[in-house]
Amino acid sequence: MKKLTNWLQGPTALAALAGVAAAAVVLSVAELIGAFFTARATPLIALGSTFIDFTPPWLKDFAIATFGTNDKAALFAGMGLTILLLACVLGVVAYRKWALGVAGVLLMGAVIVASVVTRASVKPLDAIPSLIGTVAGLVVLRLLMTRLWRMRPWRGVAADVAADVAADVAAKDTERPATTRRAFFAASGITAAAAAIAATGGRLLSAARSNVAQARESLQLPAPARAAPAVPAGVQSAARGVTPWVTPNNEFYRIDTALSVPEINVQDWELRVHGLVEQEVTLTFQDLLDAELIESHVTLTCVSNPVGGNLAGNAKWLGLPLREVLKMARPKDGADMVLSTSEDGFSASTPLEVLQDDRDAMLAIGMNGEPLPLEHGYPVRMVVPGLYGFVSATKWVVDLEVTRFADSKAYWTDRGWSERGPIKTMARVEVPKSFAQVPAGKVAIGGTAWAQTRGITKVEVQIDNGPWTEAVLSAEASVVTWRQWSFEWDATPGPHYIKARATDGTGQVQTDKRADPVPDGASGWQSVMVTVQ
Ligand SMILES: Nc1nc2c(c(=O)[nH]1)N[C@H]1C(S)=C(S)[C@@H](COP(=O)(O)O)O[C@H]1N2
Ligand SMILES: [Mo]
């Protein structure tokens, strides 16, 4: 007991305490200032994500198995303990050799900065809070160490270390009385406590500033000035198991480059329309709410969708026609493209005329009667009938530059994809599934076909190498939505191939020429193998 008390009053324990106080200052100052920077890149959250990234899989599995839905809390507790231990080591090392202490704090700062700047879509400026925190931690560590060194000579442990430093400090600073242990405890304790309060304040502040999901929940969408045309009865395929004609929001495919979903407050959202225009225009979210909105069903499709793939979805969108926005800005002669950019730096190049014609390209704020889900572009995205998403469907859109294809390149165009992307005509077989076993007799074949802006006028089915036979088309809602189909097949035992192909509104039959998704979309006929018993 006596030994423990002695040790606790000795330099090792006090130095460790100083290390903890310094580390707490680094984190809390960074966190507090970080509350005014990008929400998902605040130091503690970024560090937490990095910690999770570096947790070995077996430990992750163990945490999930042991703590269930509290696994994240457990991981953060684990991170806290790890930092606490390292901070103790930092203090002890700094006491014995100051240069190593400096190196330790700088290393800590470097790790935090690295965590922050490797998060998706942070700006280099987001490193500032961590840098300030590092400097503050260094100052605090130096102040505490100076006091500690001046408390020498120590009884017992480490009585002979850092003699030069101590002498140096003492020489420069003899007039002031040495700190007592009690005072030192108080100083580091108060520092650590203040740091904890600052960090909590920073977290609360960030939370208050980024409660976007909640704000979305309580957002009331206005009624459209022009409602969506009624969906005719019979749009759904007669074959059971075909995908629903309207895709529910939570089943809608999601494709984007964002590692973490941008969180944008509607109060902060602004769209700047500029470039080759007579009049620069800035729109706020309130401007959109006050405008004459339209509602319309549009099928989105991803260029990366392979033949037969499911990167397509159909929803009812509410928004302002981009035509109206461009009317305000008045594009200059010679402009032929609009480069739309998202808050996280993605961009798409869309032909100007496509945004001005009557296909109702829009700045969408609603999806199937709700505000856009966060991962589908809240609060505002583009929806452009007839073009693949990579050249048109910018989510979290904040900037429209009217320009020319010759002058600007979009995100994917720079990475080997095409600068334009009209959607290719495609028929998809959804039932029966590939490699299904089906009983002989009447078998329902069915699926979905699309050729947005041209419409689907025919779907044909071929069994093995037999004749192409017309399928039954479900009702057509519009040329910008997909169209379902069904086909009754008299199946005979054995292995069979089912193929489908569509014809679009221009009379063009879907090509059988196989193409990969790169650079402008897959093509070819889907072939599904089934075994009939
Ligand atoms: N900001 C942003 N918008 C984006 C993308 C992206 O990576 N970032 N991907 C595009 C692509 S490739 C597609 S196919 C559609 C997909 O929209 P969804 O995720 O709502 O289905 O969004 C487009 N909009
Ligand atoms: Mo896409």
Image: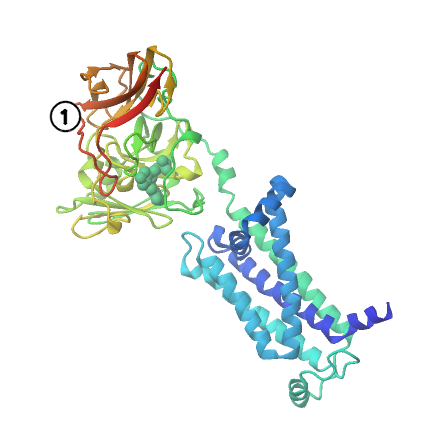
Residue at 59% from the left image edge and 49% from the top image edge:
59
Query: Relative to residue 513, is residue 208 drawn left or right?
Result: right
Q: Image height check: is 388 above or below 183? A: above
Q: Residue 431: percent from the left, percent from the top? A: 35, 20
- The quarter holding residue 473 reads top left
Q: Residue 100: percent from the left, percent from the top? A: 58, 76
Q: Quadrant of ligand 1?
A: top left
Residue that sits furthest to the right in the current view:
2
Residue at 35% from the left image edge and 21% from the top image edge:
245
Tell me if I can see residue 179 in this picture.
yes
Query: Relative to residue 260, is residue 87 drawn left or right?
Result: right
- The quarter holding residue 509 reads top left
Q: Is 424 in front, or is 123?
A: 424
Q: Residue 114: percent from the left, percent from the top? A: 47, 61
Which residue in the structure is indicated by mark 1? Answer: 508
Residue at 59% from the left image edge and 60% from the top image edge:
28
Q: Image height check: is 312 above or below 35? A: above
